[in-house]
Image (cartoon, rainbow, N blue to C red):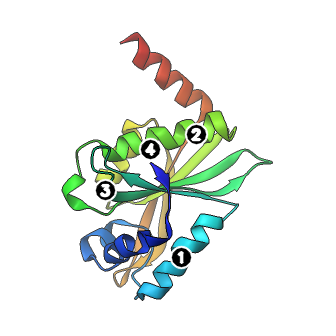
Amino acid sequence: MRAFEPEDYKTTHSWREDKEILNGIVGMKYFVSCEYEKKWINDAIFDKNSLKLAICQKTTNEHIGNVYLNMIDHVNKNCTFGIILGKKNFWGQGFGSEATLLMLEHAFYELGMVRVSSRQLLTNQSSIRLHEKCGFKHEGILRKAVFKNGEYQDLNLMSILREDFDDMLKSETKS
């Protein structure tokens, strides 16, 4: 993972135009110009209330996705987590899990968070499985919480607590 660079908009813009990618994320489809995407990347670089990073393939440094900690609340020690793998040829190869675990490690051990939550479309079972694999627990369903693709869709709500993450790491070192 690395910090965003201003030129990353060239990569992320193409992901916003991919229907398969858009169908899996919580946000609705909207048309984005290259200039809008450039501003989004630049705003993300300087945003003090979130941490948005590029996921890069180790050997080539190719930008393949983004990972986020949003709404960082230093008083209540919680934030929200998000991830997108925009390069579909990297799906199912463990990049999402690795990036999620690294971001959780940063959230808990560097930022001092106690709770990290995440929402996924209930239809996005691969994202739900990724979160489960990384220690997130189901908290419930937000019924008809998002209007997407012409219909209201349910959101799956999950979270992981610092002690859950600690226990998961301990059990991994024992095996």
Frontmost residue, 141 versus 54:
54
Q: Is disc 2 placed on a helix, strand or loop?
A: helix
Q: Residue at x 60, y 42 (%)?
A: 107
The outermost residue toward the right is: 75
Q: Quadrant of residue 121?
A: bottom left
Disc 2 residue type?
His
Question: Marks 4 and 1, how far apart in space?
Answer: 22 Å
Decide which of tag 3 and tag 4 comes sooner along the chain. Answer: 3
Give residue 174's position: percent from left, percent from top. Answer: 41, 10
Q: Can residue 85 be seen?
A: yes
| Residue topped by disc 2 | 106
Q: Can residue 137 be seen?
A: no
In the rendered view, would you say 131 is above or below 141? above
| Residue topped by disc 3 | 62
- Are the residues tagged 3 and 4 within 8 Å (C-beta)? no
Q: Which of marks 2 and 4 is in front?
A: 2
Disc 1 residue type?
Trp
